[in-house]
Image (tube, coloured by chain):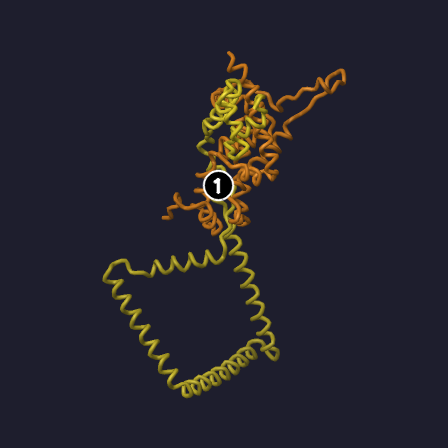
Amino acid sequence: MLELTNLPDADVVALAQQGREVAFRELLRRYQRPVFSLVYRMVRDRETAEELAQDTFVKVLSHIDQYSPEFKLSSWLFKIANNVAIDHLRKGRLATVSMSGNPEEGKSFDVAAHSPSALDALEAREIGSSIERAIGALRPEYRACILMRHVEGRSYEEIAATLDLPMGTVKTYIHRARNELRKLLEPDRKS
Amino acid sequence: MDRHLLPEELEQLLDGDIGADIVPLEAHVRGCSRCQAELDQGRRIIEAVEHAPPLDPSPLFAIHVMTQVHVRVPWRVSARDAIERWAERLTPRSRPMRVLAGAGALATATVLSAGCAWLLTHFNAALFVARLVATRVGSSAVVVGHGVATTLLGGAGPQAALVALVGALVAAVILRSVVAVARRQRPLA
């Protein structure tokens, strides 16, 4: 019986490329939580996050033979997860024009509204705290960067490589995200 | 420094940058309660984000993923696995039998090595015998094959037999490839 817990990612991927099912399961065990956390905080809906996170892993594991060990597996995973989440947010954001035709009065709304349920209660507990709401209010680009930096603990270089952004842009996004969080949390601090 | 820190300077301190340009910033913060408060607030926000709890997917998440992934097993891995399974079946389970099998393998290897050594020392004789056997077997095979084909298929027997042989080989290769592809593309349970 193969013991994969202590193997580095590259070795587990090599076993997965040989068609070892246990290696696929080990990769899932290692990364399902951080990938799901990232996607959930990006899209802020548990059911959607489950589907998108599953899509991420299906894409990665189905093309595991294309993985090159010179890159980090986690960077590849998070890159696909972020792209999947951003694509979903872009598709789901519907803009409406007001009756007067004034684009400034346009609103955006969720595609599917639903009555409160146990799932909503779970979501409220998980992402209902003030810090989670503040993170959810950030622009998706800022949100992805600050989650990778301060939740996943990635360096600026890793984030830049994962998101295909210049390092200066990553720093700018993170600095702006922190400033926005400060403004969003200011009323809570004062109260 | 006779001014408060700029936002980008606060961010440099929050990032933990080091260098000669950071020293005056740190010195200012030590003497300025407003900038110290801003810096502390920034650190509290970072700490709050860093301590955001990990969020777990549903218990069936892994199963749902695995049912959608198709595993491709390279042919060399399948072959190696098959040989390992075959070798495992042939390996005796008890220690005395393993010792006996080892002794038998050693004896066989010794005989083969001795045979190879003899052939090398009597190379010319061995080469003559090998040529003689090959000539006799080859001639006999051609005669027998021609006779069978002619008997079964008439005048064009040998040519037809050759075509049939080539066709059978091609069919076998195609069938093997189809079976190998079907075996490789199985979904994970």
Tell me the quadrant of the picture where the N terminus of chain B can be found: top right
Look at the image and give the colour of chain B.
yellow
Q: Nearer the viewer, residue B141 or A154?
A: A154
Residue that protrudes farthest toward the left in the picture? B96
Residue B65 is situated, as x and y percent measured from the top left of the image, at 50, 39
Q: What residue is rendered at 53% in x and 28% in y?
A: B24
Q: Chain of mark 1?
A: B
Residue A29 is situated, as x and y percent measured from the top left of the image, at 44, 38
Residue that protrudes farthest toward the right in the picture? A101
Residue B96 is situated, as x and y percent measured from the top left of the image, at 23, 62
Look at the image and give the colour of chain A.
orange
Residue that protrudes farthest toward the front in the picture? B2
Q: Is residue A128 visible?
A: no
Answer with left or right where residue A81 lies relative to residue A24.
right
The residue to which callout 1 is attached is: B66
Using the image, determine if residue B3 lies above or below residue B65.
above
Quadrant of residue A43 within the rendered picture: top right
Q: Nearer the viewer, residue A130 or A45?
A: A130
Q: Nearer the viewer, residue B38 or A102?
A: B38
Using the image, determine if residue B88 lies above or below residue A20.
below
Using the image, determine if residue B79 lies above or below residue A41.
below
- Using a 10 Å C-alpha cutoff, classify the residue at mark 1 as few (fewer than 14 neighbours), some (14 to 19) or many (20 or more): many
Q: Nearer the viewer, residue A80 or B2?
A: B2
Q: What residue is rendered at 46% in x and 56% in y?
A: B77
Quadrant of residue A180 within the rendered picture: top right
Quadrant of residue B97 within the rendered picture: bottom left
Q: How many marks?
A: 1
Q: What residue is rendered at 47% in x and 36% in y?
A: A32
Element type at marker 1?
Answer: helix
Residue A144 is situated, as x and y percent measured from the top left of the image, at 56, 31
Which residue type carries mark 1? Met
